[in-house]
Amino acid sequence: MNLLENIQGILLMGPGPSSVHPMTYYALSRPTLGHLDPYFINIMDEIKSYLKEIMGTENNVTIPVSGTGSAAMEASFVNVIEPGDKVLVLINGVFGTRMVDVAERLGADVDTIEFKWGTSVQPEEVEKKLNNESYKLVAVVHAETSTGVCNPVEQIGDIVSKTESIFLVDAVTSLGGMPVEVDEWGVDICYSGSQKCLSCPPGVSPITFSDKALAALNNRKNKVPNWYLDFSMIIKYWEGEKRSYHHTAPINMLYGLYQALKLILDEGLNNVYKRHQDNHEKLVKGLESLGIDMLVEPDFRLPMLNAVIVPDGADEAEIRKKLLEEYQIEIGAGLGPLAGKILRIGLMGHTARKHNVERLLTALENILN
Amino acid sequence: MNLLENIQGILLMGPGPSSVHPMTYYALSRPTLGHLDPYFINIMDEIKSYLKEIMGTENNVTIPVSGTGSAAMEASFVNVIEPGDKVLVLINGVFGTRMVDVAERLGADVDTIEFKWGTSVQPEEVEKKLNNESYKLVAVVHAETSTGVCNPVEQIGDIVSKTESIFLVDAVTSLGGMPVEVDEWGVDICYSGSQKCLSCPPGVSPITFSDKALAALNNRKNKVPNWYLDFSMIIKYWEGEKRSYHHTAPINMLYGLYQALKLILDEGLNNVYKRHQDNHEKLVKGLESLGIDMLVEPDFRLPMLNAVIVPDGADEAEIRKKLLEEYQIEIGAGLGPLAGKILRIGLMGHTARKHNVERLLTALENILN
């Protein structure tokens, strides 16, 4: 038996992966080329140029990492952090917490400011902290996938830019679903994942390094303690006349990313953002009419990740199970302190369509009544 | 313009990636499922069982790493090595050299035995070394992709098994093209890549950890200094009743791997190995009749990676360029001290077919005459 023959198509409305456009599936199945084939290098160059546009940056080093979003998080820290470096992480969910773990494993001296899960980072608190202490790097998650909160990266960027710190932003869930303006917001390192609003299957992850971030890499005392993710070598494969082999690039995944980025740019960034916002509003309205409340205050809600409070008396695991088995819709559970208390509904990329919102609302209505 | 529309199919006869079977391309384009979807977990379990069979092991921890073969090399070292640990690396090519770099970045105290590129590791030398020194880990490359040499892993395993050392083997190029018997040979950690003899595009990489290797992981003084590749967490996603989310698995790449492994097992491991050997012999005979010599002595030649000496007066870059542009065949250049001196012809996985050997020989004959 071949299990692949019997995969049932599922509407992916969880915290990622999101549903994939047919053209992106097709892209994945195009003929594999060698990683130094001149034609493939053209595709690499296009991917870089598409990523720059979507990330709002002129950074030359704007490339996909050969791994999932967590590999890009790892790459962000390991390339610039050395043991003893002071790092400030702003935490209001799972992914801020994960950043602390990643940085501490590298020997960083990590300081944090914590905010209640479901609320946003307060720029005033960051300002207060930075007035008293200096850090090599300040890190924040733009769209906290675990809570559905949007953090005010632009405002935090204004504050960090008055210091010497490298400003690191996790845009795993935001990129491609709402504006991410790396250069305008003074972001030095920004990474994302393919399987959220870019709607490419998981496996490659956009990242960008500013000149300031590259200077930190170039001024290291020791080699990057991670050969696979060492950007001083990886850059030589992605740039210049002569491309030096580092590791074999994930060719077909990069075809998928190329196509997924192209679909977004062909639709137009602003149209894509509006589609996310419109469908989010439609979803919220529909949920409210079912008596389901949102976790996050309106001003800080993400369009692409909707954390909803499990209705009184309802069994959240049962809701997810029924949605998956009876309606072929996947949504996500709560994590950490929010486990059992919330459900996470994704409207990411190709998933953010009116008919998907309607299908979910109808299914939820049937299940809850 | 969509660059993907105009990709010309290339016969991949280099050092990897290899040509991909149509069913594996199809697998890559199957509908993406969530990484915790019960149906996807069935596919994960099948992949583990297929990998165990192909790697010749009963190790429970036999899984794909979410990255290319170099990520698996990184994972092999970073999970068991701590600063100051003594490591012995046997070097006779690029990938042995790379292991030293990977281990040193992690703070290992690395000792080496070097053998001339193009010759094999001498077990007697290893025995002599191990009689005088003890190491936490001894590492060797089974199939040196840079030179086409097969190292005697079984004999080295006999020697290492008399010590306390963890025995680490790189089977990136050998797995799926010749026997790799992890348990029988006393190998503790073995990794491979998808894009060589498994004939799946690059992006996921099989790895296996014995109980001894896992004990080293569990007895670490400090956390693994690499969150993304920390097996103490990754194992919890790949094993047991409750699968814990660590990072989002590369779903569609895993479909590809599933299909690629299934094709090999359906054909039968011994048939696959024989197909590699037969086509290798046919290639060597054909090359000899063109007056082209092999770099490696017959006893140590790999079937899937054929290092040939550039004929006197021929321009190796020109040969590769003509093969690619005029015949749509990719072969590889020499690396390091062998750059310009050899060409590398891959017969890996789906590429190892009689008609491909004939197509290459005809093209070479035309180009050289």
Image: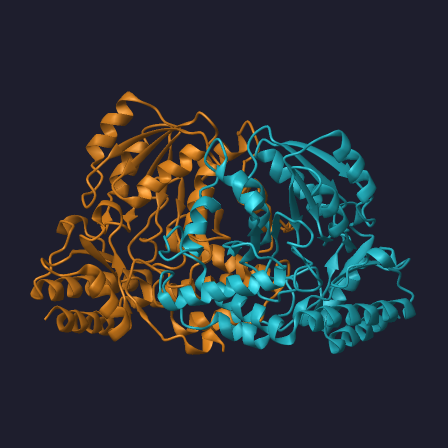
Chain colours: A cyan, B orange
Residue A312, x across and y down, in percent: 91, 57
Q: Is residue A165 left or right of residue A335?
A: left
The spot of residue A211 in percent (x, y) is 55, 46
Residue B346: x percent and y percent?
A: 26, 61
Q: Residue furthest front?
A: A162
Residue at 60% over, 52% down? A191
In screen coordinates, is B97 left or right of B218?
left
Is residue A340 in sight in this rendering? yes
- Residue A11 visible to the viewer: no
User: In the figure, B212 relative to B130: above or below?
Assistant: below
Quadrant showing the C terminus of chain B: bottom left
Is residue A256 or residue B255 the one in the foreground? A256
Q: Where residue A142 appears, x then y in whole percent?
A: 71, 52
Query: In the displayed structure, would residue B186 be above or below residue B348?
Result: above
Q: Quadrant of residue A51?
A: bottom right
Q: Which quadrant of the figure has residue B360?
A: bottom left
Rendered residue at 15%/57% (across/down): B310
> Residue at the spot x=39%, y=45% of the render?
B190
Horizontal arrangement in the rendering, residue A244 relative to residue A124 (left or right): left
Comparing B73 with A84, the one in front is A84
